[in-house]
Every structure is written in structure tokens, then in C-alpha cells.
Amino acid sequence: MRKECPVAHSDYLGWSLFRHADVLRVLGDHETFSNQVSRHPSVPNGMDPPEHTLYRDMIEPYFAPERIAAFEPVFRRIARDLVAELARDLSRDIIRDVAEPYAVRIQCGFLGWPQGLHAPLLQWIYRNRAATLARDGEEMASVALEFDGHIRAQLELRERAGAAAGDDLTTCLLRQSVDGRRLDHSRIVSILRNWTVGELGTIAACVGIILHFLAGRPDIQDALRRDRALLPQAIDEILRLHGPLISNRRVATRAVTLGGRTLQAGDRITVMWASANRDGAVFDDAEQFQLERDQARNLLYGAGIHVCPGAGLARMQLYVMLDELLDGLASFTLLSGAEPARAIYPASGFSSLFLASA
């Protein structure tokens, strides 16, 4: 598609963009390509400036390097426990028994949510996935309400506790103001929904994608075992080749020409991360893993004003998990006879994955 029809139209996705240059143009021009793509409020992802700027400035400090670093020991304990369980029984499904529990536990740890939410959130992941794959609008709405209910319950607990509420990120949001006004619960729910739903899906997908790659590349696996300083670069390059997100949406605010196609105001646009990050016009030998590759143009975390604010957090969480896996497991490969099950669009990665000792 990138070569033959780089700007393509379908009823399902609207205008799909496959080239890195076109995707980057859309990401860099928020006046022509709006993020207000849903009828449901989304703070701040679904906002445009100047409103987006106010909320983005408010959330940035929550992802400051020093704040993120304080959670590293928490994430490491979680990863170590999961890896120890896996080492005792390598027959476990990596996605269901390691990647998804890791995503849930670290997100609860980051937000100050109790362990009692671990099981309900895992069940929510399964229910949300099934509803999305079935394109069941009624069930998807029910799933969304269920998730919002979990968040509102946490907010109400902290409201009742008053000054005695723990000083976690969720409590901080309850005390947060934007433009001189305290955040109301609906805005906080939207912020936490964006943080959590994105985190649960992408971190779990990333862990599965990276382990699948390393299982098939014992040379890279061995290099990373010998030198963990290579991990950050390796993770970004693996996820360039196979990203945790396939696409993202925008809507045109005015008539514009892209790739020789004329789009009208109101037209839906789908930017295809998975294609842009394999564009040979930008990346030499784009289909090949190169540990030394310059990652400056990797769109793994987006670009422009909507670049992922939690990129530093995600990188640290993935580093911690891979560091613990390489410590806790001997050399591994894919389990013979158990073909990895690929996730179905709009998800990415794998829905099941099994490893074996090499």
C-alpha cells in the first residue's frame, strides 16, 4: 500500500496514510488535522489547542523523570515476582500470565490503586477485547461504563478520606486545578481512562512482541544478556518493526491535498504507524533489525503536540521487565508446535505466546 496506494480510502478507516512523510505531516499540523475524533470527551488526547495546551501542561509533571524514577523499585518487584513464577513453569501463556498481569499491576502501582483491582481489571481487558473484536457497540459502551465505574469508585474513596487520603497520583488529580478551576470527576475519569486503557493494552503488547522477537533471535538475546546497556535501543528498534499500536485517528478541519488525493473538511483520517515505521524512504533496510539504528524518526510514541507524555514511563517499565526476564530465565525459544496467535486489528502483538528453553 505504501508503494502502490499510499493514501487510500475505505468505509471502515476513511483515508488511510501509509507513508512516513504523510503521517508526519498530519502529526505536525494540528490546525488542519484535528484530534477531536470522538463524540466522547477525551482529556487531553481528544482536544486541540488552546484547550489541549492547558491540560497537557497540567499532566506533564506527572511524567517528570524524577517522578517516574521513584516507581522503578515498585515495577521491579512486580516484574521479578512474575518472572519467578514463569521460571518455575515455562508452560504459561506469556500474554495472559505475564504481560497482561504486569501491565495491570504496574498501572495500579503508578496510580495508587489497590491490589483488589488487579483481577477485575484483567477481566475487563478480556471483556473489552471481545467486544472490540465483535464490533459490538452496545457491549463496548457497557465495558466503557464498567471501567469508568472502577475509576469513580477510587475517586469517591479518596473524597471520603479527605486529608487522610494517600498522597498518590489519583489523589493528586483530585486536588488539581486547570486555568484556576478544580478538575471535576468527569475530567479526571477521562484523564485516568486515557492513561490506563492505553497502558494496559500497549505495555502488554510490547512485552509479547519483544519476547517473540528475542525467542527467534538468539544472537540478539545473547548480546542483551551480556550488555544490558543495549536494551533501550533494542526495545525501540524491535517496536519500530512491530509496534504495539497499528494506527491512530484524525479528522480534517479543511480541504487539503495528501499524496495527490483531495480530502474535505470532516473527512476521517487513519495514520498507519505500522507502515510509517517501515518506510524505506526514511529507514535504511527498513524491514531489518539494526541495533545501531538512529531512532530519532521512529514514530513509536508519536510526534507533534500529541506525542505520548508517558514515553519515558513506558520505556522504563519495558526495560525493567526485560532486564528481569533476562536475569530470571535461561535462553529461550518459541515452543515448538504452539504457533503464536496474532492479535486482531485494532490490537497489535499477540493474543497468546508460549516459550520453551532453548
Image (cartoon, helix red, strand yellow):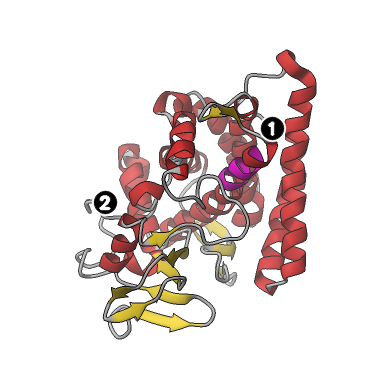
Element under disc 1: loop
Q: Is residue 249 magenta?
A: no
Which residue is nearer to you in this view: 182 or 139? 182
In the image as oriented, which residue stretches furthest toward the top?
163
Residue 231 x/y as whole percent: 35, 43
Q: What is the span of residues highlighted in magenta in the rendered image?
A: 188-195
Instruction: Kindly identify which numbered label has been placed on residue 113.
Output: 1
Residue 277 visible at all:
no
Disc on the earlier residue, 2 or 1:
1
Seen in the picture, residue 59 relative to 91 is either above or below; the reply is above
Instruction: Kindly identify which numbered label has been placed on residue 302.
Output: none
Amino acid at pointer 1: Trp
Amino acid at pointer 2: Gln
Which residue: 47% across, 43% down?
Answer: 51
Question: Which picture quadrant has residue 195?
Answer: top right
Seen in the picture, residue 172 relative to 302 is either above or below; the reply is above
Is the stretch drawn in magenta largely helix, strand or loop? helix
In the image as oriented, which residue stretches furthest toward the bottom?
4
Residue 282 x/y as whole percent: 21, 64
Going by the image, does 58 lie left or right of 165? Answer: left
Asked if labels 1 and 2 touch by Cβ distance under 8 angstroms, the answer is: no
Residue receiving disc 2: 295
Q: Residues within 10 Å of mark 2 (few under 14, many from 20)?
A: some
Which residue: 48% across, 60% down?
Answer: 245
Which residue: 72% across, 46% down?
Answer: 148
Counting every numbered tag in the picture gives 2
Question: Which picture quadrant has residue 128?
Answer: bottom right
Q: Is residue 190 magenta?
A: yes
Question: Which picture quadrant has residue 273?
Answer: bottom left
